[in-house]
Image (cartoon, helix red, strand yellow):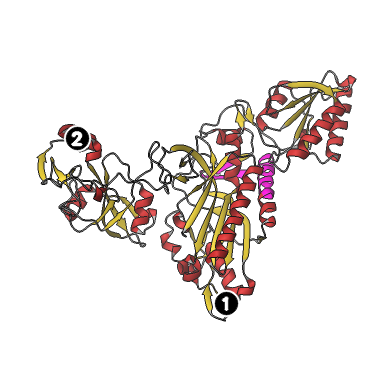
Amino acid sequence: MRLSQMHIKTLREVPNEAEIPSHILLLRTGMIRKLVSGVYGFMPFGWRTVRKIEQIVREEMDASGAQEIHMSAVQPAELWEESGRWNAYGPELWRIKDRNGRDFCLGPTHEEIFTDIVRNDISSYRQLPEMLYQIQTKYRDEARPRFGLMRSREFIMKDCYSFDTDAEGLDRSYQIMYDAYDRIFRRCGLTFRPVEADSGAIGGSNSHEFTALSEVGESDIAYCEHCNMAATTERAACVDAPAQEDVEMLPMEEKFTPGTKTIEDVANYLGLSQEQTIKALLFVTYDEEGEENGYVAAFVRGDRDLNMTKLVNALDIAEHQIEFADEEKMGAATGCVGGFTGPTGLHDCTLVVDSELPGLKNLCAGACKEDHHLINVNYGRDYKADIITDLKVLKEGDPCPVCGQPVKHARGIEVGQVFKLGTKYSASMGATYLDENQKEQLIEMGCYGIGITRTMAAIVEQHHDEDGIIWPISVAPYHVIITLVKPNDEAQKALGEKLYEDLQKAGVEVLLDDRKERPGVKFKDADLLGIPVRITVGKLAGEGKVEYKLRREEDKVEISVEEALEKTVALVNSERRG
């Protein structure tokens, strides 16, 4: 393609709205175009890369035995009501009505649609297993869209769904997709880590998140270098402190602790370590209709942080169904006192207690009385829980739940996730098959998503420098850019045109920068756009020589045009598949 004929607009200045490298560079290159907050369009260079990522995904899905279909983004509310997600999914579900007042949503995912297809089309075990997938635009009404393609309201996703006769079949399908994802992200040039993850609004029994390592990512992962443990901090299990079985319970006492509303304050005032205290966090919950459903008091050791995902899962509610309580209002109903709440003396609320607290003795907790705390508080004697579960955040340096060695933390970008759904949707929507004995059985399901456009942003986050993007050849919008220093120079023009034609004949995707611009502008654009190979046709054109440079390297060399052609074709052929 001749650059003089392309629709291209690059920016020298950093857009005010952009904060992270991928957002900045995709806007500066003109690859994406903002329409409104969280909604972006794709211009020629950007769209070519999106299509390259889609093609890698498509090839690996097809090779894994999945069949591609395409469903509408507009989904009727009735299917979501059948699954129970119409209200449970929360405010991110983009709800719309047609002219007749019928409810629809813009699909954030397609479990209901694919389950409906299979329950209508499959009746016998002989038709299973089956995998169906699509690559399609999805919609989530994010409250705070940010970071460009990283958290947007409209995005392109590949979603695949597997259907099996039993749990063993689901395990096989899950592993097939897990392996396919490994190949996909390697081919895209990403450094990534698969980690155990929470299933969230999708549901199911087991899930892994594929995380592209990046400091700007919103996923926080814990991993162990001594074993294979790796999980999002939302999912990661924690090791409880050893139970103090031989410690004698002391009499509970009330202490005057004026103005000590924080764990640090009360520990310092009473001369205790924070490990000897109990931290209280107060919440109000809502039902699926948005009405108040009751109060919750969650308790962890004073030096611990509460893991909200674990709390939500323990209560079996959605994330949007809980928020921090108004302490004064909750106090009137339950007896809690802001800054001085403990597990004793509370009433009319659900007490959720972290799993390590029952094993610890003689702790300090709020007395549910202004400016007062209790010491020597013990589980069983002084308070009991409605729910006991692991509520802790696994912090860096904490013992690994598998081998006990200190864990490390890293940040990353979620680019894909795989889920074992089991019978969550087949049970609620009646997706069944007849087994060998003509007995009706529920279909076992899995689902598997890849954020196509988010993967694009993740690639840029991992492959850029101060001058622009450095695309891996497998996803680059073009493989090579030929820069004519002086387009009107006959020798340069003739050599550039011949090289342009020869590369195209060899199957290389090539740009010819024949614009009447200063050489410096052309070089800056080539670096900004991140084209993997730059061949400059300049003053040595008469001798049949060009300047050859890889975007990912600093060095540039002067070689014959024949050698440049040979090196380029060999490089592209070896790396185009990732």
Crowding near the residue tagged with mark 2, few <14, some 14–19, many ≥20 C-alpha atoms within 10 Å: some
Q: Label 1's element?
A: loop
Q: Which mark is residue 435?
A: 1
Residue projecting furthest to the front? 246
Query: Which quadrant does the N terminus fall into?
Result: top right
Q: Position of residue 163 (x, y in %)?
A: 58, 66
Which residue shows up at 64% across the image and 61% down it?
70
Q: Position of residue 169 (x, y in %)?
A: 57, 64
Which residue shows up at 13% across the image and 43% down it?
370
Kindly identify the amino acid type of the residue bearing the numbered disc 2.
Leu
Per the rendered image, the range of residues in magenta is 33-56
For residue 49: magenta? yes
Above or below: residue 100 compared with residue 328: below
- Pick whichever, 45 or 221, lies toward us: 221
Q: Earlier in the sequence, mark 2 or mark 1?
A: 2
Q: Is residue 558 left or right of residue 115?
A: right
Q: Label 2's element?
A: loop
The image quadrant of residue 81 is: bottom left
Residue projecting furthest to the bottom? 438
Whether residue 434 is visible here, answered yes or no, is yes
For residue 353: magenta? no
Above or below: residue 373 compared with residue 539: below
